[in-house]
Image (cartoon, helix red, strand yellow):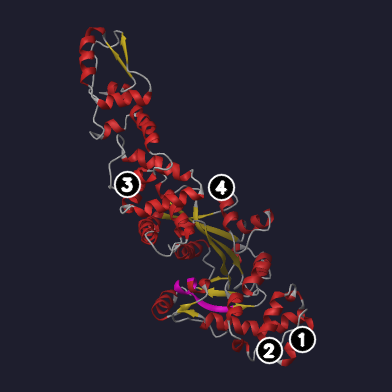
């Protein structure tokens, strides 16, 4: 048996004493044997050599007989070559129908080879071909079977499905057969990224260059300004923690967070950058940026899991730390200001404030709304001490209104605020001139918020917000 499995169907080495029986068995071999010879373009050789006193002349196995024949290396190469002709670039529908149990047109082959070829061809396809593949997959009723077989047969099945869902989300389909398929794929992926399937690791300067490159590539909130900035964020007094999946490559972080170990609740990004307190003297851990790296996991709350696992990690390493807080932007603030009616801005500026701002503006405005938005649009307003101080009072009031009263149904309209409140945080403080970078000024007028995680109240805060939409905040707000 071993000899037959290793040599079939390329070479048979037999004894001359049984040549007649060989010919008889060859006539008994049926059409699959002819397919093999045609696909490989090489006949089965008969050599008159006394290699074995006894020879093995096995019958050609049925393609569906047993798994041992499918695992024969020669047979695998044969099937892969045959499949490449049966599943061309434009033949995805036949392959998917086969895997989903709708047809059996692709024969002879096994499901494993079909999965391998489909995944390989999809990964090498362009955007247009991938969109066509997704549309084809949506037209097949048994797409869940395809997802399950990819996980069963492909070594990189989880990565393939995550990337596939990311491509689906990029199509931005709001209705049709692709919408339920997206939900089905999300349901398949969600159990694969639970607490038992992920692990928390620190990313430092000693980590893999591929992992660090992923951090640089996906850091959108506070981009790295250079190598020195990167070393500072990954060095002493800082922690970068990331979640990795046990079902994906070790160099593929799912989500990561940057943490600063400082003396108190940080009021600005400059405070974090300039802090040089030793780790042993730190009293507060500030989560100042959190970013996801896998677009296909959108809707699967990896950030919540990361924060909940990061706090016990920091408590074990630094028992002296008692404050766990974020320093978060308000990404929709300026957009909300532009959409609000003029009545929202009434009584925000005195006549003297309007005069001061109009004297500085290139094009003076009449209403408080136009004055405030005109000032925000003019470059350099944050550097002028008089203009900066004049804008502080109205913008701080407006940001408070946005955080506490701008809602989608019963939940906070600001996505960052909604994320932290669902996790059980409370609004501790609103900070002026917290992020004066171009990105911070354009999105949130330089204002940032501290969302504090009071470990004794996280659970009730989360329940109250999820059930009643109740926003908890401190007296300073």
Q: Nearer the viewer, residue 440 or 234?
A: 440
Q: Position of residue 467 (x, y in %)?
A: 38, 79
* Measured Cα–Cα span from mark 4 to mark 3: 37 Å
Q: Which residue is mark 3?
A: 97
Q: Which residue is mark 4?
A: 210
* Measured Cα–Cα span from mark 1 to mark 3: 71 Å
- The residue stretch that appears in magenta: 419-429
Q: Nearer the viewer, residue 396 or 270?
A: 396
Question: Between tags 1 and 4, which lies in front?
Answer: 1
Residue 69 in view (yes/no): yes
Q: Which residue is mark 2?
A: 349
Q: Nearer the viewer, residue 363 or 265?
A: 363
* Measured Cα–Cα span from mark 1 to mark 4: 52 Å
Q: Position of residue 61 (x, y in %)?
A: 24, 28
Mark 2 or mark 4: whose residue is earlier in sequence: 4
Magenta highlight on residue 35: no
Question: Between tags 4 and 3, which lies in front?
Answer: 3
Dot 2: few (<14), some (14–19), or many (≥20) neighbours within 10 Å?
A: many
């Amino acid at each position: 048996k071993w000899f037959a499995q290793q040599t079939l169907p390329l070479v048979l080495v037999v004894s001359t004493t049984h040549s007649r029986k060989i010919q008889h068995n060859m006539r008994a071999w049926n059409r699959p044997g002819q397919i093999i010879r045609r696909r490989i373009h090489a006949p089965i050789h008969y050599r008159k050599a006394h290699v074995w006193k006894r020879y093995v002349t096995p019958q050609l196995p049925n393609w569906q007989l047993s798994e041992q024949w499918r695992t024969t290396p020669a047979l695998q190469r044969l099937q892969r070559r045959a499949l490449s002709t049966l599943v061309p670039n434009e033949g995805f529908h036949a392959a998917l129908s086969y895997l989903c149990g709708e047809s059996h047109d692709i024969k002879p082959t096994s499901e494993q080879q079909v999965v391998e070829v489909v995944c390989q061809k999809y990964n090498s396809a362009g955007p247009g071909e991938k969109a066509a593949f997704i549309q084809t997959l949506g037209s097949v009723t048994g797409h869940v079977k395809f997802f399950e077989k990819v996980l069963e047969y492909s070594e990189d099945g989880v990565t393939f499905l995550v990337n596939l869902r990311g491509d689906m989300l990029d199509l931005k389909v709001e209705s049709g057969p692709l919408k339920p398929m997206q939900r089905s794929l999300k349901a398949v992926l969600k159990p694969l990224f639970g607490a038992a399937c992920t692990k928390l690791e620190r990313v430092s300067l000693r980590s893999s260059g591929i992992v660090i490159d992923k951090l640089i590539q996906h850091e959108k909130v506070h981009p790295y300004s250079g190598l020195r900035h990167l070393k500072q964020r990954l060095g002493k007094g800082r922690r970068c923690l990331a979640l990795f999946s046990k079902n994906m490559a070790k160099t593929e972080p799912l989500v990561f967070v940057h943490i600063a170990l400082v003396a108190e609740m940080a009021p600005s990004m400059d405070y974090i950058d300039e802090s040089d307190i030793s780790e042993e003297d730190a009293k507060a851990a500030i989560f100042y940026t959190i970013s996801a790296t896998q677009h296909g996991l959108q809707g699967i709350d990896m950030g919540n899991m990361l924060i909940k696992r990061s706090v016990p990690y920091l408590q074990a390493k630094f028992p002296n730390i008692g404050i766990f807080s974020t320093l978060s932007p308000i990404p929709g603030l300026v957009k909300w200001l532009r959409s609000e009616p003029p009545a929202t801005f009434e009584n925000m500026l005195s006549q003297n404030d309007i005069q001061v701002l109009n004297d500085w503006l290139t094009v003076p405005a009449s209403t408080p709304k136009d004055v405030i938005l005109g000032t925000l649009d003019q470059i350099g307003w944050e550097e002028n001490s008089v203009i900066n101080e004049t804008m502080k009072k109205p913008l701080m009031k407006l940001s408070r209104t946005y955080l506490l009263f701008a809602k989608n149904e019963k939940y906070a309209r600001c996505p960052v605020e909604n994320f932290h409140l669902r996790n059980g945080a409370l609004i501790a403080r609103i900070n002026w001139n917290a992020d004066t970078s171009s990105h911070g000024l354009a999105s949130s007028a330089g204002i940032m918020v501290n969302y504090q995680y009071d470990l004794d109240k996280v659970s009730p805060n989360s329940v109250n917000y999820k059930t009643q939409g109740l926003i908890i905040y401190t007296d300073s707000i």
